[in-house]
Image (cartoon, rainbow, N blue to C red):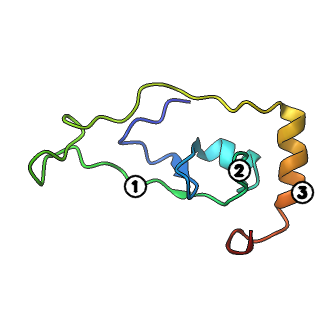
């Protein structure tokens, strides 16, 4: 799903791979790219509180990137990693 800068439904891993809440749940809090866990992504301020820093001047990406892994590959990876707490991965 699209996750604009104002979305509270976005979650990121430590490498900033971004997924929606439904996908994070489906993936059992395992990033399919690095194996890390997810945290809520901060919402970018809509207003320019500091000169040059705003969504208007630095918009979020509009390009959706899909995982290169098949459903079977995702399931195998998640099953292998999900039992390890994110802080210990």
Query: Where is residue 46 shown, x and y percent of the image?
Result: 22, 43
Q: Position of residue 45 (x, y in %)?
A: 25, 49
Q: Where the N terminus falls, by quadrant?
A: top right
- In-front residue for pair 13/44: 13
Distance of label 2 from label 3 (alpha carbons): 16 Å
Secondary element under disc 1, as helix, strand or loop, is loop
Give the residue number, with chain letter if any, for mark 2.
Answer: 25
Which label number is shown at residue 42? 1
Q: Which residue is mark 3?
A: 80
- Looking at the image, is mark 2 or mark 3 earlier in the sequence? 2
| Residue 72 in which image quadrant | top right
Above or below 41: residue 61 = above
Residue 85 spot, x, y in % from top left: 75, 71
Callout 3: SS:
helix
Secondary structure state at the residue bearing disc 2:
helix
Could you say where residue 63 lies in the image, as x and y percent from the top left? 47, 25
Alpha carbon distance from label 1 to label 2: 18 Å
Residue at point 36% right, 50% down? 43
């Amino acid at each position: 799903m699209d996750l604009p800068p104002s979305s509270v439904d976005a979650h990121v891993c430590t490498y900033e791979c971004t997924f929606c809440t439904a996908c994070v749940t489906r993936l059992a809090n395992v990033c399919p790219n690095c194996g890390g866990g997810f945290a809520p992504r901060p919402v970018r301020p809509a207003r320019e509180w500091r000169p040059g820093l705003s969504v208007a001047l630095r918009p979020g990406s509009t390009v959706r990137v899909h995982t290169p892994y098949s459903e079977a590959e995702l399931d195998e990876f998640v099953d292998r990693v999900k039992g390890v707490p994110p802080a210990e991965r």
